[in-house]
Amino acid sequence: MKKIVFLTLAVIAFCSCSNKEKYTVEGSVNDPAYNNRKIVSKQIANNEAVAIDTLLVESGKFSFKGAVDSIVLRNVYSTDSVALVPFVYIVEKGAITIDIVDNVAKIGGTPLNDKLQTFNDKFMATTKKGQELIAEYIKKQEAGTATPEDETALRESLSGLAGENTAMMVRFARENTDNILGEYCFTTYYFRVDSQTKEEMDSFATPKIKALLNL
């Protein structure tokens, strides 16, 4: 009888593990310099970044998989290349894709990751506009043709673009307070914005988010 009970418990435990939702990550890198270099995935636990996966890029590819115990953010960076722009992806059920092109990652394949990538694309598009304006002004400076009016116009344009990004982030955070994307916005941007924006974000922060930020 004891053997039967033990076997039954073992079967239940096996089925429980087998029934967990799974995720896979399939990644690619367009730069052959990454071959045989390490990609590290970390997760915040007890206020510390803990390495979850460390793997080599082979023939421009990397992959890993696991069980979805909960929907969490993972931070990814390269231990061998300072060029790679660190990025995050969300562990959720499904097939997640990470394509690294010119050291910048594009994430997709699952609902939350697609949503995060759409936000990042819009945010970076505005940021790129600002970089282009700065580059144009520097060219004028080098040519000796930059005027005080040019500098004033640049400052005003950059301020406007920064305002667009801040408004976009706050809107995205508000729309996603019920999921991890809202937490991502708060933990990533809250301590970078002005006091007025903080007050606005405070107005819709959930108890969980406030606890995360010790508000």
Image (cartoon, rainbow, N blue to C red):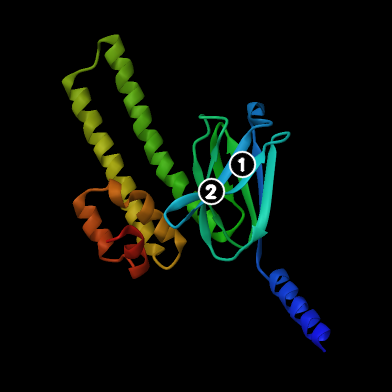
Q: Residue 99 carries which label?
A: 1
Residue 206 against residue 109 in the figure, above or below:
below
The residue where tag 2 is placed is: 42
Residue farthest left in this picture: 148
Residue 175 lies left or right of residue 38; in this view the side is: left
Quarter holding the C terminus? bottom left
Q: How far apart are marks 2 and 1 (CA)?
A: 18 Å
> Which residue is nearer to you in this view: 32 or 9?
9
Residue depicted at x 24% and y 60%: 200
Q: Position of residue 54 (x, y in %)?
A: 62, 43
* Residue 178 placement: quadrant: bottom left
Residue 130 lies left or right of residue 146; in this view the side is: right
Residue 154 lies left or right of residue 133; in this view the side is: left
**Which type of secondary structure does the marked residue at label 2 adopt?**
strand
> Which residue is nearer to you in this view: 80 or 112?
80
**Which type of secondary structure does the marked residue at label 1 adopt?**
strand
The mark nearer the N terminus, 2 or 1, is 2
Residue 42 against residue 157 in the figure, above or below:
below
User: Disc 2 or disc 1, which is closer to the eye?
Assistant: 2
| Amino acid at dot 2 | Lys
Total of numbered circles in the picture?
2
Q: Position of residue 57 (x, y in %)?
A: 68, 36
Q: Which mark is residue 60?
A: none
Residue depicted at x 22% and y 29%: 153
Residue depicted at x 67% and y 27%: 32
Residue 98 against residue 144 in the figure, above or below:
below
| Amino acid at dot 1 | Asp
Residue depicted at x 57% and y 46%: 41
Residue farthest front in this picture: 2
